[in-house]
Amino acid sequence: MKNFSVMTLMCLLGGGALADTHQVRLDVSPVYSVLKSGQKQTTWIRVGLAGFKLESDRRRAGVNLAIVMDKSGSMQGEKIKRAREAAIDAIKLLSPDDIVSIITYDSTVNVLVPSTKLTDKQAVITAINGIASGGNTALFAGVSKGAAEVRKFLDRERVNRVILLSDGLANVGPSSPGELGSLGKSLIKENISVSTLGLGLGYNEDLMVQLAGASGGNHLFIEDASELVDIFRREFDDVLSVVAQEVDVRISIPKGIRPVRVLGNDADINGQDIVTRLAQIYSEQDKYVIVEVELAAAETGSNLKLATVSVTYANMKTHESDKLSGGVRTSFSDNDKKVAASLNHKAMADVVALFSSEQNKLATKFLDEGDLMKCRQILKENVDYLNVNAMLCPTDSLRLKELAKQNGFQLEQLQGVTSNQDVKANLARKSLRYYQNAVDVQQRASNAPTLKDK
Amino acid sequence: MKRRPLILIVMIVVLPLTALTWAALRVAESEQIVVRQRFRQLMEVRLHDVNANVALFFENTERSLNQITAIDHFDVKQLRQVIRTQPSILQMFVLSPSGRITYPDPGDIESLNGRERLFLVQAAKMFTGRDLKEAIVRSEHVKNVSGEPSAEEGNRPAIRERRVSTSSRTFPSPVPQVMQELQAQQQVQAPSQLVEDAYRVAPVQNIAEFTESSGWFVWYWDRGLNLIYWQRRSSGHIVGCALERARWMADLVAHLPVTVDSATENVRRVATRVRLVNTSAESVYQWGSFEPDYAQPLCEVSVVAPLASWRLQCFVPEDQLTAGTGRSVYFTLAAGLCAVAAVLAVISVLFIREYARDMRQASEQVSFVNQVSHELKTPLTNIRMYAELLDRDLDGMEDEGTARPRERLNIILSEGQRLSRLIGNVLTFARQQRRTLQLQLGEEIPDRLIQTILDRFEPAFGEQRIDVQLELNAGQTMLLDPDFVEQILGNLVSNVEKYAASGGLLRIESQVSRFESVSGTLHEPSATTTSSFRLTIDVIDKGPGVDASKRGEIFQPFARVSNTLSYAAGTGIGLSIARELARLHGGDVVLMETSEGCWFRVTLRGGPQADAV
């Protein structure tokens, strides 16, 4: 009852003001810093990592990029034309010091431009201009070759990324979302991320989302080929603004508190230890890991350590390997008002966002089962849930309202739809998957046109 | 006349050509098989090169895995660190020398992470022979509510205690209502006990297989083939690692060639398609610009161990197999056939010309014979006339000494008659060829005509002992061409004399029937009915008869001109002339069916009956 102080240890490492501005900030906080005493309960710990600002005038980190382009028959016409434009536009944004490779695939794979420093942009652009469409979709092979090209110049100091652009279902070689997801998980270990750009309505969103999500890349949904250049550029902005990568987060939960799960992220829970990797942190991005823990009943006034956190990451600005550590404690009270007052809005909003993603997944499941009534009902509840919590977290209400708007839009799309075979259902499903991935991996680049226009 | 040589020529040209074509095609076919065989060998060599490349890939993988698994201190944290940092590894495991699995420890499920638990479940069958999957799937599928594919599964602890929902709702919980309800529903039975039991009951079964110091192990789970590399440490422990399937496939794909853009590709190189197919014959990776539209590869080889159940297939465009030597074979074949056809055509043209010349010569000969015959006619007539006169003179001389000259004279007469018949036939034949035969009707009594003709043969019959039986019933006058009748009958009777003398019998029957002309009554109903006669003469012998197979041919005139003059005088044209004349006379000569000998029936149409009768 006396001292309900929260101990949030921030940035123990890094000396001096200059170093501070070029450091990722660690912030560990529980949803409620004061918990209700005398009862078993579940609570959530937010491990936040805030990326510093990358000054645009300064030299950014080098890029090691593979652009994997689908040139199967379905890309014919407008799509392939736009894809070429987008790729060329992207090449123009890169500097001669960057490394790039262009891989095209249809039934087979062609390494059009092997991994090379971009000293001769024109040659690469000419090669891109020569891409014509036709054939099947050997997506797995395309990504494999793309990753292999990136691996040739794999560099901790560069942003290593494969950008996959596809409009079709993978139909040659391994093609299940699980397999592509496994490949993504394997690639993130090497610090290679795969961003997937799904074009049109024909691609397999599960596969694309899994690949991007597991490897820490972005997934973007491009409904109309005319948006391609714009969205490609957005992806590129992301690539060019990475401030930290290979972010390994270790969270130690003291004995007596049971770590239940990590929301959104893929993590290993080894007993009391949680290990997870974030592929990268973008400039000024607020990244977070949410851990759900279960606590035994505690006495009023007692004080408990919830977690200690240590983070290592590769700083793209200083080109050093940095370490951060922190911890969090909670106290217990029988006063409900005190508990309610201790709510951390930011943490709450993040937890809510992740739960909304779970609800969204549930809605997708019902959509897949053909139960559109249930699907709509859950989306409706999700909208209400997000709106209610937006009022609860005034500092983050804008973000939650935006998510509510997205869910509302998906709900609207599904209005009057009777079968999940419907084109509208397909569009909605892609939008649902995009939403889930964007929330789970805390994607910064967004499908803004799809969200704003409608 | 002109059709037969034409058919002959066509046959001369076509038959050998057909035979040649067939033979050449057979040769080309076998050539093609040889080409295909050679191609297949070539491609097999290529596939073996690829295979060597795959082997190299696995060697490299093996080398790096050997380093990774070279662990002697089995600290769980360290092992987990290896798994976390090594991109190719899905999970590691450690077997004690006694065959117990010590990491991930199935005895302490609680401390394991999701991936380790999943591994224990999936590998249970491999290690213990017990299929845990099925048992667990039942409980898992209830849990998997989020719709997230199984990859998420490892994230969650498999054991979950009953969740205590916050009963007092005075401060907001972020858990949405739907999720709370769901969590309440999914009270999953802990599979940890199952796992623990399975591994406790049975030590690792396959420990016997880990006899060498290191090796590969192939195991099927989760949609396909999984590779496990293991090595035995000096302590007797076996350290193994299951590879991330998607990853080694991706690495293998990256290791294999790409399709080179056809624009930059060497033009002379044959477009092919090489395909790496997995155990269920699905394509894992393929390269080469050829897009096969058939399923059967030209050749295939097994991939090297540990991927021995996978295959490398090679596809080559069908036209590539027939191209090269194959195409030239067809070209030479066509050229050769053309040459042979030309030679044969030339030969047959020469042949035709020769044939035509022969024909011309023959017809010249015929006309020569004709002229000669014509020239012979007058002296022969004179000879016969004087012989007859001599015969009459002898009749007047009632003398004993005339018997011998008379006998000789009869021979002269009969030979003379035969000669004139012969000449008559030749001339008739020639006129027939020129279509100048004309009927010259006169009032005749058929029986009398018949008798006259037979009288002429009398000496010959007597000599050959041919008994002549007559049954003549055509005594009335009718309009006939006596020359025609004489020639027809003469030819038939002479045939009997020549060929049927052995039968010893010649029977001649004659008969006249009357029939009415229909047209007259139609136009002039009041007028007297115009009536015609039909004279029927049957010439029957008991000779050897005519072969059934020859019956159709006997009325054909000789067709070949190469026959000698003497043959032309024979029956070769006799019957044909008889028939031709009979037909001109409104009748016919037919060979009647009879059991023995010959029976020729002559029908002639006589003119209207003379008013006087």
Image: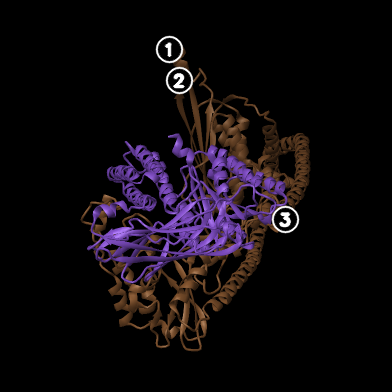
Chain colours: A purple, B brown
- Circles 2 and 1 in contact, beta carbons < 8 Å: no
The disc, 3 or 2, on the residue closer to the chain's N-terminal end is 3
Q: Disc 2 is attached to a residue of which chain? A: B
Q: Position of residue A198 (x, y in %)?
A: 49, 47
Q: CA distance from mark 2 to mark 1?
A: 11 Å
Q: Which residue is mark 1?
A: B525
- In the image, B480 versus A231, the foreground residue is A231
Q: Position of residue B291 (x, y in %)?
A: 58, 53
Q: In the rendered view of the protein, which quadrant contains the N terminus of chain A?
A: bottom left
Numbered tag placed on residue A447 in the rendering: none
**Within 10 Å of the Cα at label 3, are there few (<14), some (14-19), or many (20+) other Cα atoms?**
few
- In the image, B204 versus B23, the foreground residue is B204
Q: In the rendered view of the protein, which quadrant contains the C terminus of chain A?
A: top left
Helix, strand or loop at mark 2: helix
Going by the numbered disc 3, the residue's amino acid type is Arg
Going by the numbered disc 2, the residue's amino acid type is Val
Q: Which residue is mark 3?
A: B268
The disc, 2 or 1, on the residue closer to the chain's N-terminal end is 2
Q: Which residue is mark 2?
A: B518
**Within 10 Å of the Cα at label 1, are there few (<14), some (14-19), or many (20+) other Cα atoms?**
few
- Circles 3 and 2 in contact, beta carbons < 8 Å: no
Helix, strand or loop at mark 3: loop
**Where, by quadrant of the figure, is residue B6 drawn?**
top right
Q: Disc 3 is attached to a residue of which chain? A: B
